[in-house]
Amino acid sequence: MSKFSTRLTVLFIILAIAGGFYFTSNHATSNNQAYYSGKAISYRGQVIFGTVNRDQMELFRMQGNGISRVAMFGNLSADHRFNDLAFNQEGSDLYLYLIDGFSIYKYRVSEPTTPVLVSQTAQKETNEWLKTIRIAGDRIVTVGNNGIKTWSTDLQAVVSTKIITNTVAENVNFSPEGAFVFSQEGTMLSIYNMPGRNVNMSSQKLLDYQIGATNDLTIDQASVHKVFNDTERSMVYIVDDMDLRKMDMSANTYKTFRHISTLGYDVAGTQAADHLYFSDGIGVVKFNKDSLKPIKWRYTTNLADGNGWAMGMEVVNYGSGERVILFNNANIVLMDENLKVLDTFVLRESDPMPIVEPMSLRTDRNRAAANSEVMVSGTGFSAGEQLRIDFVSSARGAYPSTVTVATSFAGTNGRFAKIVSVPSTLKKGQVDIIVTGLASAKHYNTSFTIE
């Protein structure tokens, strides 16, 4: 057995005895699910981040220098579990995109405590399975078993490619502006030009767009390795199971730095800084972009209740510095740019946080005549609060603009259902049905047509 294999075997046995760690990106369920990946964004002076590692969407916000989980919800389609997420700021609003394999869901999370479902793609039982979702420039990009597909922000498919079939879809990443694709699989890293919007890629192979590749990475298993593309330097950084590497856009290695672990995971950072960070299981290292020399480092295996294993990592600008969010197996770690630990969020089976569904509203039909009965139902309100149901018209003249048709109460899970009568005093045409929580002031609306 090689020295490398021996070290890896011993390390695996030690960690397995310590509590069991999650080294790959398989979405298996267990009584001790791990935090191994997530996404983060800086929005209006706030640090917002989330993860779907435990099948639920867990949404966090940095408050002061602490971590606060502000929402947690499952898929409204009970048969499917979320498997990836992405944040995107569009205008002044913050949106969260989620996928469950079949569909994309778009939530408005400008107020993170109240996620609002805005739209979703239709669920189609086909041979396509969406595995990951990314933001690439002004496009939404999904990677699935049929390749890469790009979407507009209103969830209309723009370009479809039959290209990458990476066994670890999380290892397909994109440059910040969406011009390049990076795919690491096994010992190979391939770099491609991203096809343009107007290219019909239904039969095109991305191999025609390849600009560089290397097959000498040291990677012994199918774990997640996120690359970082520095657009100003035109460089790519990746950490394998032996070295941190700095490469050009043709995948030629410029520099290497031998780290002390036997596994590598993510490289993350910000474009303008002169440094980046990498995770290698046992901790996080801050290093210089040019020389690769370490600046700071932090071991994370013993943080909080222990059982730490540094895997996925996100870095965002915050004030004059940065915040590092590390998904550390049994906990999530928040650090500053000097790798000082600010707070940890510990995974506990006895966690009392209730599962709160995002706000939604629906009717059993979207049009009906006056005095007809319609079922109105919704989710995401505060448990037990009283609700007011209004029909609101924008028509002007002698007709009233708002008619309250009923009140109801949300159940302990925040859901409600109520049969109401379509008012006869509103002008025919399109109106809004608005449901308002009288205690929480939460409200949601849906369109309806009076015939």
Image: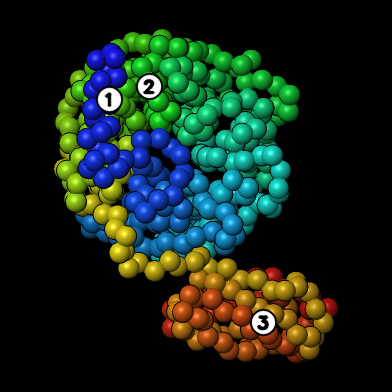
Q: What percent of the width, then of the height, locates residue 148?
A: 61, 32
Q: Residues within 10 Å of mark 2 (few under 14, many from 20)?
A: some
Is 333 placed left or right of 235 in the picture? left
What mark, if any, has residue 18 been given in the picture?
Answer: none
218 or 183, which is in the foreground?
218
Is 356 placed left or right of 150 in the picture? left
Residue at position x 71%, y 49% from top? 124
Disc 1 or 2, which lies upstream in sequence?
Answer: 1
Q: What percent of the width, then of the height, locates residue 325?
A: 30, 44
Q: CA distance from mark 1 to mark 2?
A: 9 Å
Q: Residues within 10 Å of mark 3 (few under 14, many from 20)?
A: many
Disc 3 or 2, which lies upstream in sequence?
Answer: 2
Disc 1 or 3, which lies upstream in sequence?
Answer: 1
Which residue is the site of mark 3? 391
Q: CA distance from mark 3 to mark 2?
A: 61 Å
Which residue is the site of mark 1? 8
Where is residue 299, by image quadrant?
top left
Q: Give SS at disc 2.
A: loop
What mark, if any, has residue 220 been given in the picture?
Answer: 2
Of the residues shown, which amino acid type is indicated by label 3?
Phe
